[in-house]
Amino acid sequence: MDQARTGSPRAVARLISLVEDAAPQLREVMRALAPVTGSAYVIGVTGSPGVGKSTSTTALVGAFRALDRRVGVLAVDPSSPFSGGALLGDRVRMQDHATDPGVYIRSMATRGHLGGLAVSTAQAIRVLDAAGCDVVVVETVGVGQSEVEVASTADTTLVLLAPGMGDAVQAAKAGILEIGDVYVVNKADRDGAHQVVRELRGMLALAERTADSWRPPIVSTVAVKGEGVADVVTAIEQHRTWLERTGQLGKRRHRRVVEEIAAIAMTALRARFGELDHDQRLEALADRVLAGDLDPYAAADELVDQV
Amino acid sequence: MDQARTGSPRAVARLISLVEDAAPQLREVMRALAPVTGSAYVIGVTGSPGVGKSTSTTALVGAFRALDRRVGVLAVDPSSPFSGGALLGDRVRMQDHATDPGVYIRSMATRGHLGGLAVSTAQAIRVLDAAGCDVVVVETVGVGQSEVEVASTADTTLVLLAPGMGDAVQAAKAGILEIGDVYVVNKADRDGAHQVVRELRGMLALAERTADSWRPPIVSTVAVKGEGVADVVTAIEQHRTWLERTGQLGKRRHRRVVEEIAAIAMTALRARFGELDHDQRLEALADRVLAGDLDPYAAADELVDQV
C-alpha cells in the first residue's frame, strides 16, 4: 500500500485487482487510503461504440502529460461479451503511453452486480488518486444505464459523438444528452460532422437552463490527428473553473459520495438477506407467505427487523 | 376489497391501480388478500417486439375460456417511451374478450424503480388470484432484463419467436433462451419458420439437462388464425404436470416469494437511507468521507447501524 502511494505501478495494479474482485482486504485498503485521497480531478469519457473514445482518451492523456500532470486511465468494460473484443483492439493504441511512468492505464472488469460498476469504479479512482494522479480519465465502453452511473462518478463528463455512428438522436435515446458537460464531435473531417454539430446544438438548446447554468460547449476534433484536443482541454478547464466558482464541485462530489455509501450499504444488507436465507429464516417467511398466513410486505418488515 | 374478491371488475381495477401507484393502502390490501391467494396458475408470455405476443395472448385466453377457466391478463409495460405506442395498438385486438365477465385485462405501467416491476407484477397477480382467476397471463413488452425478472414470476414461461424478427440468435443474445419452458414459433406460415425451429432446436440441444430435466417443447403456431393454440395449451398443461410431479412448482413459487420479500425489504431500507439523507446523517457521513476522515465502507457500516 505504501508502494502504491509512492506510485509503484505494480502496487497500484494489485490494489485495483482487489477492487475488481471485491476482495475482503479492500476495506482495510480503503481505510488506509482515505486520508490521502480527494485531490484527483475525474474526467468521464463516454459515447457509442465507434465514435473514437480510446483515441480521444489517448490524445487527452498526451495533452495532460504535456502540462506535466500525472494521469490515470480507467477503461471500464461492463463485462459485455460484445465489447470485450473491441476493447482489446483499442488498448493497443494506448501503447503510446505504456512506457511513460506518469501514466497508469487500466482496464477494469466487474462482476456485473447491481450498482457494482459505479462502486468499484469509485474505489479504483481512489486508488489512482492516492497514487498521485492529478487527473483520472474514466472511459466507458458501450452505451446504457451503466454509462450514466459511471458518468456520475466524474467531475467533468465528455460525451463523444461522430458523424455516421452514434449521432445526436441516438445519443438522446441513450440518455447521454443530459449527462455531458462538454460535447465532442470527433472525426470532424468526415462528411456529416457539421450536421451532427447542428443537431446537437438544437437538442442542447431545448434543455432548460438558468442564467447561472453551465452551458455545455461543443468541440470538434480529429482525435487521431490530435486536432482540437487542446480545445477539449480548455473546455474541461473552463468547466472546472465554473464548478469551483459556483460551489458545484463540492456539491457534485458530495452527492457522489452519498450515492456511493448508500450503494455499499445496500450491497451489505443484501448479503445479510442471503445469510438469513441460508439459515432458513427468510425461507420460513416465504413459507408463511405461500401458506397465506402472511403478506409479502409484512414478511419484508420481519426481514428488516431481523437484519 | 370484498367486491374484488367476488370478482367486480371495477374493484379489481382499483386495487391494481393501488399496486401501480405503490400506494400506502397497498400493505393493508395485501394483508387482507393473503389468505385467499395461491390458487392461480401464472403463465408468462415474452419475446421480441413483433413476434405476436398480444395476438397469442388473445388466442390463449380464448382457449382457456373454452375450458371455462377464469382468466386474468396483465400486459406489463416497462415505461419505455418506445413500447408505449405499440402497446396501445395491440390492446385493441384484445377487445375480443372485453365484454366477457370471465376475463380481466389490464395494462400495467410502473414507476421504473429498481426491482419495482417484478414486485408490482407479483402484487397485481395476487389481486387477480384473489379475484378468482384460475389462470393469469403476464405479457411483457420489449426484451431485456425486466423480461427475465417478470418471467421469474411465472409458473410456465412461453418464449415467442417468429421468422424475420426476434430470431433464435437474437433471443439468445437477449438472454431469453434460458428462461423458456415452452417455445412458440409464431407466424409459422411464413418463409423462414422452419429455419427458426431448426436454429432453436440446435440451441436448446446445447443446454445441459439431466434425465429428470424438463425438455422445453417447440410449438409452431399461426396465432392470428388460431392454428396451433391448442398445442400450446397442451404444452402448458404438460409442463404444469411435470412441475407438480417433481415438486418444482412449490420450489419455484418458494424461490419467487423469497426474491419478492427481499426486493420489498431492500426498497424499504433504501427509503430509510433517503430519510437519513433528509435528516442529514447520511450527509454528515459523506462529509467525513470527503474530508478523508472515513472511507466509504466504514461509512456504509455506520449507515447500516443507523437504520
Image (cartoon, coloured by chain):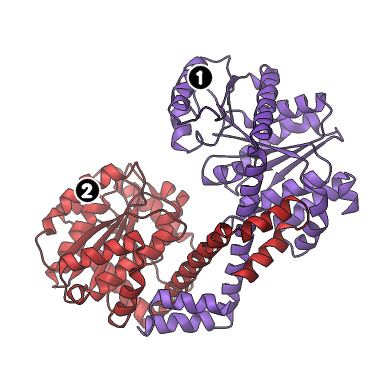
Chain colours: A red, B purple
Left or right, residue A94 beside residue A214: left
Crowd rating for badge 1 (residues with CA inside 10 Å; few <14, some 14–19, many 20+) = many
Asked if the residue at tag 2 contacts the one at tag 1, i.e. Cβ–Cβ closer than 8 Å, the answer is: no
The amino acid pointed to by label 2 is Asp
To which residue does mark 2 refer? A90
Q: Nearer the viewer, residue A170 or A117?
A: A117
Of all chains, the one bearing label 1 is B
Q: Nearer the viewer, residue A278 or B258?
A: A278
Disc number lying in front (1 or 2): 1
Measured in 3D between alpha carbons, the distance from the residue under mark 1 to the one under mark 2, in whole angstroms, is: 38 Å
Relative height, residue B198 to residue A105 (above, below): above
Left or right, residue B43 beside residue A199: right
Left or right, residue B260 beside residue A215: right
Left or right, residue A13 beside residue B234: left
| Point 64% across, 65% down: residue | A303
Question: x and y percent of residue B225 in the render?
Answer: 69, 17
Question: x and y percent of residue B298 in the render?
Answer: 42, 77
Secondary structure under badge 2?
helix
Query: Can the viewer see residue B123?
Result: yes
Secondary structure under badge 1?
helix
The amino acid pointed to by label 1 is Val
Q: Quadrant of the N terminus of chain B?
A: bottom right
Crowd rating for badge 2 (residues with CA inside 10 Å; few <14, some 14–19, many 20+) = some
| Point 78% across, 44% down: residue | B129
Q: How many marks?
A: 2
To which residue does mark 1 refer? B197
Asked if badge 1 and badge 2 are on a common chain, one would say no
Q: Residue furthest left?
A: A99
